[in-house]
Amino acid sequence: MAALKIVITVLFILISVILVGIVLVQDGESGGLTGAVSGGGETFWSKNKGRSAEGKIEKVTKYLVIAFMVLSLVLNLPIFG
């Protein structure tokens, strides 16, 4: 059981570091309320965002956040205590 905890902890730390790097690489939300009022959010690039590199980075970020949350819950189970 101790070996499994070590493996999960190493994976948790690795995901944490990768997640920090990916979040720092991403562009900020430039639209906000101003973009909603002026209609700047409905461009060709925003409609096809899922196919671009930004869209792929956002998908990877979502999956890493899910993995981060699941691993944090697993590490806090009483069996690892």
Image (cartoon, rainbow, N blue to C red):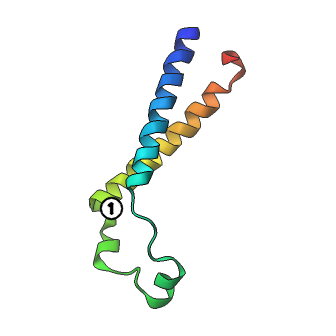
Q: Image check: 32 left or right of 48?
A: right
- At a point 53% along the width and 23% down the height, the residue shown is 9
The residue singled out by tag 1 in the image is: 50
Q: Image check: 44 left or right of 3?
A: left
Assess disc 1: are there few (<14), some (14-19) or many (≥20) residues with their C-alpha within 10 Å of its C-alpha.
Answer: some
Q: Quadrant of residue 2?
A: top right
Where does the N terminus fall, quadrant-wise?
A: top right
Residue 66 screen position, x and y as percent: 52, 42
Q: Image check: 17 left or right of 47?
A: right
- At a point 47% along the width and 27% down the height, the residue shown is 11
- At a point 42% along the width and 40% down the height, the residue shown is 18
Secondary structure beneath label 1: helix
Query: Residue reaching furthest bottom?
Result: 38
Residue 20 screen position, x and y as percent: 46, 45
Whether residue 30 is situated above or below residue 57 in the rendered picture: below
Look at the image and tell me whether residue 1 can be seen: no
Whether residue 27 is situated above or below residue 9 in the rendered picture: below
Whether residue 23 is situated above or below residue 72 in the rendered picture: below
Amino acid, disc 1: Gly
Q: Quadrant of residue 49?
A: bottom left
Q: Image check: 14 left or right of 51?
A: right
Whether residue 29 is situated above or below residue 17 in the rendered picture: below
